[in-house]
Image: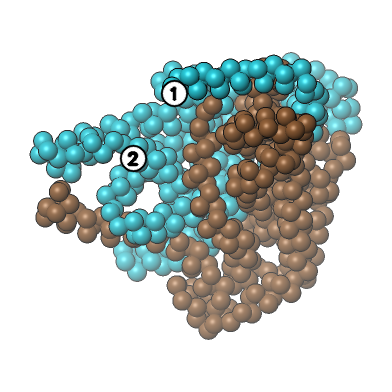
Amino acid sequence: MYHKTLPYRIFSIFNYAFLAIISVLCVLPMLHLLMVSLSSQAPANAGLVKFWPIGFTLEAYTKTFGNANFLSSLWVSVERTVLGTALAMVVNTAAAYALSKEAHTFRARNIYMWYFVITMLFTGGLIPSYILILKLGLINTLAALILPGLVGVYNVILLLNFFRAVPKDLEEAAFMDGAGYLRSFISIYLPISLPAIATVSLFIMVGHWNAYFDGLIYIKESENLPLASFMQTIIVQADMTKFDPSLVANLSQRTIRASQIFIGALPILLVYPFLQRFFVKGIVIGAVKE
Amino acid sequence: MDMNTTQQTALNTGSHKMTKRSNKPTWILHLMVLPAAILVFIFSYLPMSGIVMAFQDYKAALGITGSPWVGLKHFQYMFQNEYFLQITWNTLFFACSKIVMNLAVPFIFALLLNEVRHMGFKRSIQTFVYLPHFLSWVTLGGILIDMLAQTGIINQFLTSIFGTKPIFFLGDGFWFRLTIIFSDVWKEFGFNTIIFLAALAGINPALYEAAEVDGAGRFKQTLYITIPSLIPITIVVATLALGNVLNANFDQIFNLYNPLVYQQGDIIDTFVYREGLLTGQFSFGTAVSLFKSVISLILIVVSYRLAYKFAGYRIF
């Protein structure tokens, strides 16, 4: 009824317009960046490019992909994302399955649970972690980027809540047929929880792709630096000292900086539609208690 | 009839559990938790033992076992250090401003979005405003440094509209603080509306129908039905945020700040990184971060207790 009244209609027009403006403001920075990256250097440096390329050229992208440092960093990022996500999923789903059992079947369950949750509440902090990686001899290795964050307690809780929602009868039928826990986990729980597993994998992937700080402190050789850390050093800190000056000199040009940032964000933009579909569900299910 | 079936199922599962416990060995379950437990031990519990460094003068050559003990020296130095008080204040300022803004803006945005009846339009808006949440602060840092530069697009825009001089957004303490709060809200407000939209979807439509019958317009409906329905979830979110008052977002500050704005922009985490890790004052850095961890732990425990008391909220 109310939406037919004149004041509400006037409000609605303003409301739609306001929401449209706000939402456009959320994507304009990315758009501006893309346009700068597609423009010629002179107009970009003069600050003439707004939301349409001036002197359209792909030169910035060919130069970015022609840079050995950028390519090796891209490769490290791909490696850490693929390996890190795969390993994390194996370890986290297995732990989540075991912890999804009730305490009367799996007596140590609550002890393990506290053991994990404590690490969410309290950490040793930056410096002891750094010294540990140093003492373990993991500086400059891929392991330093993958192992420390492999167990995500939040993800384990999310997965175990999913596993709890699986009907118990399925597992009991399998037990009757002589299956053990491992068999039930692999043949029943994993296939049936595929959407949940896809969601969590996607979150871990995005986390790996965006992670820059571990690369910054644990990786000292420029060819082992993941892309996010590489960009942080070159673009944000504008610190060229870690690299061979002749190789990275042209990376500081405005259009090339823009193209690097855009390529760095591209995988996130590509998986974003899937993320958006899943995360609302994920949050809701993660919030559902036994 | 229904009762009977339920009881029977209950009995059945009961007897299964009996047989399950005797038949299925649980060592396999231990084995499945083991890799995670070992990794957590190495990468979370071992660093916790490194905290003793805060009470030592740690020398890399001597190690944790050989370095001399100095008691509370680093803590005394910390509390007498004026700069430490400044960064604690900065941290509180940023964190609290963000907590308030990240509650208020999504709250209002959710209310406005709730008035959109066109589903396609609503979904497009959501797709747009959720996006910045998924971009990293490295990406956004790169973009913002470019856009907020003296000759960047934002200053060009402001100059052409208001005829003002270019603003030194990332080089002036006052503007830096505004930029930090504003860009954080810009990045997260969309994503933070999700929880309010979920609460809005849960409101019983009969309430609105009854209000309509009583002659309440949309504004009164919002005032007396919609807003009160959002209060419980707002209280939970606000209470849980209490655990974050010392987390001013390292990633954001780190990717936007520079020595010009240390006085107004430096926070505990960035300070620990610079003074502790980069300059090698390992013990002092550990002491500062231990101080932060302990306060945070207390606040988290208190906030979860309160959230449980107010709203029955439990994390697992």
Q: Which residue is at the far front?
A: B1
Tint of chain A: brown
On residue B2, which mark appears?
Answer: 1
Between A207 and A136, the one lying in front of the other is: A207
Graded by Cα atoms within 10 Å as few (under 14), some (14 to 19) or many (20 or more), the crowding at tag 1 reads few
Q: Quadrant of the N terminus of chain B?
A: top left
The disc numbered 1 marks a residue on which chain?
B
Q: Are marks 1 and 2 in contact (CB under 8 Å)?
A: no
**Residue shown at the point (50%, 33%) measured from the top left:** A287
| Left or right: where B101 falls relative to B149 | left
Alpha-carbon distance for marks 1 and 2? 34 Å
Chain of the residue under label 2: B
Q: Give the x, y percent position of residue A283.
A: 51, 40
Q: Position of residue A15 (x, y in %)?
A: 26, 55
Q: Is residue B223 left or right of residue B84?
A: left
Say what amino acid the circle numbered 1 marks.
Answer: Asp
Q: Residue at x 53, y 72 (%)?
A: A36
The amino acid pointed to by label 2 is Leu
Q: Are marks 1 and 2 on the same chain?
A: yes
Q: Position of residue B177 (x, y in %)?
A: 46, 45
Chain identifier matching the cyan colour in the rendered picture: B
Q: Secondary structure at mark 2?
A: helix
Q: Would residue B231 be visible to someone looking at this image? A: yes
